[in-house]
Each structure stands twice: as structure tokens, then as C-alpha cells.
Image (tube, helix red, strand yellow):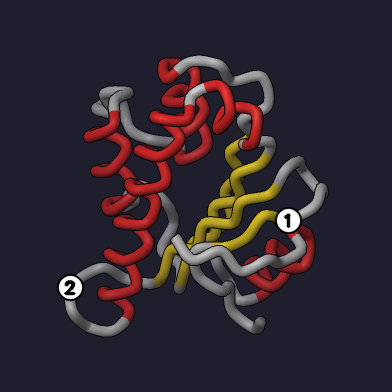
Amino acid sequence: MTLDPRPLGPALAAAEEAGWTTLRVDLAGVRSKAELMRRWGAALQVPSWFGGNWDALADALIDLSWLPRAPGRLVAVTSWRSYAQVRPGDWETLQEILEQAVDFWREGADGVNDAEGELTVLLAEAPGGSPEGTAHEPPGR
């Protein structure tokens, strides 16, 4: 994942101003894969079919049909460093899934698939805290 530092507040404001759907995944206190899946499921507002595993998360991130139609979606992941340190293997898997989802939506925006809009994932240390980066630049930046 290409990380390009951006402040969290302005990125969220720019996305919302452009009509994007913004979602927040706070990983503060997360120490297990099960809790990680619960946080992602809640943040993405997944339907009942969400299985709470890597495949289900990957499927959810390339579907998102239950969310309002929008020209793009920004997912702000906060307080992730602790989880990355405690569960480095799971963190690596999560990053791969996020990269694949961002690529899927980017290709859709370029007309390669039927995906509508874009997906941006922004990593930040804490809500309003120092930024770690973004997988794809939000609108107006």
C-alpha cells in the first residue's frame, strides 16, 4: 500500500464536501482477530451475511452495495499501531485486503470493472491524531 501522509481532519472534510461516504474504524484496544472483524463489520455497516473472517471482509470491501451511492468512500482507520504490533501477521493480511479493495475500486473508476466510485483508506494513529498515510488520495487534495 502506498502511504502518503495526510491530516485526518482535512481529508475527512474534503471527502464529505465531495459527497463521499466517510466511515471510521477505530482499532483502539483491539487485540484479537475476532474483535478486529467486529470493528470492521460495525464500521462498514455490513449486512447479516458478514462472516467475520478475512474472505468476508475482502468481499464486503469490494461490494459495499448496502451503503448509499456516492462518488467515493473514505475509510479512516484510527489507533491501528497497537494492533499492528500485537498481531503483525494479521496486520499484514489486513493491509493486503485493503490494497486489493482499493485497487478494485480504482479499476472501476477507470472503467475496468463495474465498481462505482473510489475507495480510499486513510491510516491515522488516533481520531484527530497524527496521520500515517492514505492508500489513495481523497478528492480535492
Q: Which residue is drawn at 32% across and 66% down?
A: 103
Quarter in which the N terminus is drawn: bottom left
SS for tag 1? strand
The residue lying at 66 percent from left, 19 percent from top is: 29
Viewer-side residue, 73 vs 76: 76
Element type where label 2 sits in the image:
loop
Res. 97 mark: none
Q: Determine which quarter of the picture holds residue 138.
A: bottom right
Q: Where is residue 131 in the image (x, y as percent from the top left)?
A: 73, 56
Q: Which of marks 1 and 2 is nearer the N terminus?
A: 2
Q: Mark 2 points at which residue?
A: 113
Q: In which quarter of the image is the C terminus?
A: bottom right
Please tell me how many numbered marks the rendered image carries. 2
Q: Is residue 91 above or below residue 104?
A: above
Is the residue marked by circle 1 packed among few (<14), some (14-19), or many (20+) residues within 10 Å? many
Identified by mark 1, the residue type is Pro
**Residue 82 image position (x, y, % from top left):** 65, 28
Q: Where is residue 115 in the image (x, y as percent from the top left)?
A: 26, 68
**Residue toward you, 84 or 119:** 84
Q: Label 1: which residue?
A: 131
Q: Residue at x 68, y 36 (%)?
A: 79
Picture layout, residue 139 above or below residue 132: below
Mark 2 nearby-residue class (10 Å; few <14, some 14–19, many ≥20): few
Where 99 falls versus 30 (above or below)?
below
Work out whether 115 lies above or below 132. Answer: below
- Foreground mark, 1 or 2, reads 1
**Is 87 on the left or on the right of 6, as rendered?**
left
Would you identify the image quadrant in which residue 84 lies?
A: top right
Alpha carbon distance from label 1 to label 2: 31 Å
Residue 106 vs residue 39: left or right?
left
Q: Looking at numbered disc 2 in the image, what kind of residue is underneath it?
A: Asn
